[in-house]
Each structure stands twice: as structure tokens, then as C-alpha cells.
Image: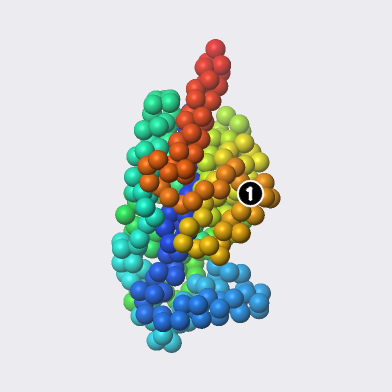
Amino acid sequence: MQERIAVIFDFDDTLGPDSTTGYLKDAGIKDIAGFWSEVGEMMKKDWDPVPAYLHHMIQTSSQGEMKPLTQQALMAWGRQLPLFHGVEGIFKHIRQVVKEANPHISLEFYLISSGIGDVLRHTSIAHEFHDIWASEFHYHDDGQAVAPKKVVSFTDKTRYIFQIQKGIVGEMSKGKPFDVNKKVSAEQIRVPMNQMIFVGDGYTDIPCFSMVKKEGGISIAVYDRNHTEKWGNAYQFVADGRVSNLLSANYQEGSDLVNFLSMAVRSMAERIAVSASSYQG
């Protein structure tokens, strides 16, 4: 019996404002809407969204329209990246809820994002995650980004759900992309999907929403109250039955999101306790 719960977050517009748009502003791009419009034009030419924006960042930097796109610059932006209210305290809060409900539970947090890894690994909450998966650049010897190295989007995100399920996480999993395809027995499963909670906001999260919910886990869609133009898209996740709930991305104590997350992990922890007792009996 696996007494372990995984709470998995997206980042952009889930835990904080869009990290890439924020970087572009910080890097000197004046026409942000124009940048994303150009990425949209690339998509019309059959580019996928994530490699399109990564490539366009490299091109824009090389043309001198923004400050040099270097690993150091991305890391520096990560260290000042803003978060939604209450995010820094949510991890301790959920740990306490689980401890009170079932002290035998091992609770792990993960981050799966289409954003840029060198940004997200340097945020103030990076240490809270058991592992972080995101899109990556390859850098020249001088530190300049020269090509996309890893793309995380849509069904790419589900790969990392399977890695969590099978225990292919941490430093020992790096550089072994095919390990996720290994067949494992039920006894070898590290975190069953019905012991996962996935929190995200957008279209790149749909495969994870659907898979986790279908397998008995809990999928939560959040929306940024400051971006009313996205509310309709978020509601559609509920209408389509892809998520368990839709809530405002407010992580302050007493908010609907924190209350629902607390109830979800408490219920899951108590269910595992009952199952473990039956298993041992």
C-alpha cells in the first residue's frame, strides 16, 4: 500500500502571473502583444506553441530587440518572479493538513510547466518541489541561448505524471528519457494516480486534467481574477467535465481554493489510512 500523495502544480497563471511575459517586459520588449502575435503567426505555419515562443525569444534577442537571452538573465528573473497572494504559505499549510489527517502519509509537491526551467528553478518556492519539469534552452559557451533543448506542452506534461507515478523523479532520473516507458507492476507503483491532485489553468493542462480525474485523482482549474478574458476558457474545463472544481487563484488562508485543497488532501489522506488498515488486516 503506497501511503503517498502528490500535489502537482502548473506555474504560469496558476501560482503566479505568466513568467515568460514578465521576463519579456523585464528584458526590454515594448510591444508584448506584438511578440505573442508573431508567435501566433508562427503557429499558423505549423509551429507548435512552445517551440515557437522559445525560438522567437532567441531570434528577438539575437536581433538586439531585447537584452541578451542568457542563462544568468533567466535565473535572475526567476529570483524576482512575483507570485499570487498566499502561494509561499500554501505548502506548509497542506503539509499540516495531511499530518493531522494521517501522519503516515508522505506528501510531495511537483511542478510541471511549459515555462522556462531556468526561471522556475530559481523562484522563492523552488525548494518546495520534489522535482520541477519545464521547457529548457541549450546555451552556447558564452551563456547565450541558441536553441530549445526541451519542450513541455500538452501531452508532454502527462509524461511527467507517469514519471511521478513510477517514481522516476529527482537527479537519478535525469538523462533517461525512455525510463518512463518501462512497465511496472501494481506493487511497484510509487504514487497511484488516484492519490494525485493536479492544479492548472490552461489549455496545456487539459491532458493532465483529464487523465488524473479519469484515474480517480482530483483536478483543479484556477483562474486569475485580473484576466477576465480567460474566465470563459476556464469555465469550459468544468463544462467539459475535465476538472473537479474551478476556483480563483487566491492562495490566502480561508480562500475557496485553500479550503478546497485542504478538503481534498484531507479526504485523500483519510481514504489511504482506511485502505492501508484493510490491506494490513
- Give the residue displayed 55% in from the left and 70% down from the top: 51
Report crowding for label 1: few under 14, some 14 to 19, many 20 or more residues within 10 A (C-alpha). Answer: some
- Badge 1 amino acid: Val
Residue 211 placement: quadrant? top right
Where does the image place residue 216, in percent across and percent down from the top left?
Answer: 62, 36
Q: Position of residue 86 (x, y in %)?
A: 36, 49
**In this rendering, would 281 be left or right of 169?**
right
Q: Nearer the viewer, residue 262 or 39?
A: 262
Point 52% across, 41% down: residue: 197
Residue under the point 41% across and 74% down: 24
Taking 273 as reference, is 235 left or right? right
In the image, residue 179 sits, relative to residue 260, either above or below, namely below
Residue corresponding to mark 1 = 238
**Foreground of the two, 154 or 260:** 260
* Residue 88 visible at all: yes
Q: Is residue 89 left or right of residue 156?
A: left
Question: Measuring 45% from the left and 38% from the top, which residue is drawn there?
Answer: 259
The furthest residue to the top = 281
Give percent across and percent down for residue 234. 59, 55
The residue positioned farthest toward the bottom in the image shown: 63
Q: Quadrant of residue 104?
A: top left
Q: Secondary structure at mark 1?
A: helix
- Residue sitting nearer the eye, 138 or 133: 133
- Tell me residue 204's x, y (percent): 58, 59
Q: Looking at the picture, does residue 162 appear above or below residue 135?
A: above
Q: Does the rendering let one see residue 168? A: no
Q: Quadrant of the C terminus?
A: top right
Indicate how the structure is coloured in the image.
rainbow
With respect to residue 144, does 153 lie above or below?
above
Q: On the picture, is 78 further left or further right than 236?
A: left
The vertical placement of 139 against 119, above or below, is below
